[in-house]
């Protein structure tokens, strides 16, 4: 069954659920996509003593949001919401083998849960953000709501990595989470005009240490 037909058949079902409740489920720590298993190169940065405290984590996350992966993810998800089929472009944007593993493995996990529990069929070998955007459209979730939940969840996961492994206090972790509520809003206000022409990154240290992670002697996280 093609995607458009599946959308049409299930429109009535998808409109009776509260979008915010759906997003709370999808971005809950209990939702089995295994996001806790990925550090997005942060483990290597900590291992190489490039990130040592709360201020370092804040700088890293700001760069990731305004100049790195999350900037591109925002553009990709918005583009999918405008009906662009860009999964291959998303996968090609990965800066390292581990980044692509992260995209595909989380996508496979999300796709499986969508099929088994939500009766939504998504394409195989799709990136997580591609699957997420398609599911958001299917369940009539506004792009603005989806992207806020996605960005905050991504950042919160990396803050949790930092709390466990720098180590950093729980108070510092929560202070950063609060700070990034405002930072995400600032980013969204600045990025309204972004299109696929704006894809790119200047956060090279994050990409370099994502590659270095592949060769760490001892690894806790998959990326």
Image: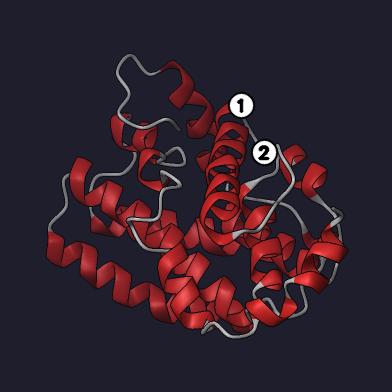
- Residue 34 visible in the current orientation: yes
Within the image, what quadrant is residue 83 found in?
bottom right
Instruction: Quickly name the residue at label 1.
Output: 97
Q: Is residue 182 above or below residue 112?
A: below
179 left or right of 79 in image: left
- The span from disc 2 to disc 1 (Cα, nearest Å) is 7 Å
- In front of the other: 71 or 220: 220
Residue 102 at x, y percent in the picture = 54, 38
Residue at left offset 40%, top offset 78%: 181
Q: Mark 2 and 1 residues: CB-CB less than 8 Å, in contact?
A: yes
How many neighbours does mark 2 have within 10 angstroms: few (below 14), some (14-19), or many (20 or more)?
some
How many neighbours does mark 1 have within 10 angstroms: few (below 14), some (14-19), or many (20 or more)?
few
Q: Quadrant of the C terminus?
A: top left
Instruction: Quickly name the residue at label 2.
Output: 94
Residue at left offset 54%, top offset 32%: 208
- In front of the other: 27 or 78: 27
79 left or right of 222 in image: right
Q: Is residue 209 above or below residue 172?
A: above
Residue 9 at x, y percent in the picture = 79, 71
SS at circle 1:
helix
- Residue 140 visible in the current orientation: no
């Amino acid at each position: 069954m093609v995607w458009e037909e599946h959308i049409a058949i299930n429109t009535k079902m998808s409109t009776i659920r509260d979008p915010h409740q759906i997003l709370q489920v999808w971005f809950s720590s209990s939702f089995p996509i295994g996001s806790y298993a990925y550090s997005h190169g942060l483990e290597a940065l900590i291992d190489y003593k490039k990130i040592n405290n709360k201020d370092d984590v804040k700088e890293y996350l700001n760069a990731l949001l305004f100049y790195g992966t999350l900037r591109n993810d925002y553009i990709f998800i918005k583009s999918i919401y405008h009906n662009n089929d860009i999964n291959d472009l998303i996968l090609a944007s990965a800066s390292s083998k581990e980044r692509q593993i992260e995209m595909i493995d989380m996508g496979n996990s999300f796709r499986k849960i969508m099929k088994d529990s939500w009766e939504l069929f998504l394409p195989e070998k799709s990136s997580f953000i591609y699957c997420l955007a398609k599911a958001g459209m299917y369940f009539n979730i506004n792009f603005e709501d989806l992207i806020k939940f996605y960005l905050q969840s991504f950042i919160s996961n990396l803050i949790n990595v930092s709390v466990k492994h720098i180590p950093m206090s729980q108070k510092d972790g929560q202070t950063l989470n609060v700070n990034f509520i405002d930072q995400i809003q600032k980013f969204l206000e600045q990025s309204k005009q972004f299109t696929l022409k704006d894809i790119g990154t200047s956060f090279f240290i994050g990409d370099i240490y994502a590659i270095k992670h592949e060769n760490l002697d001892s690894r806790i996280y998959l990326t």
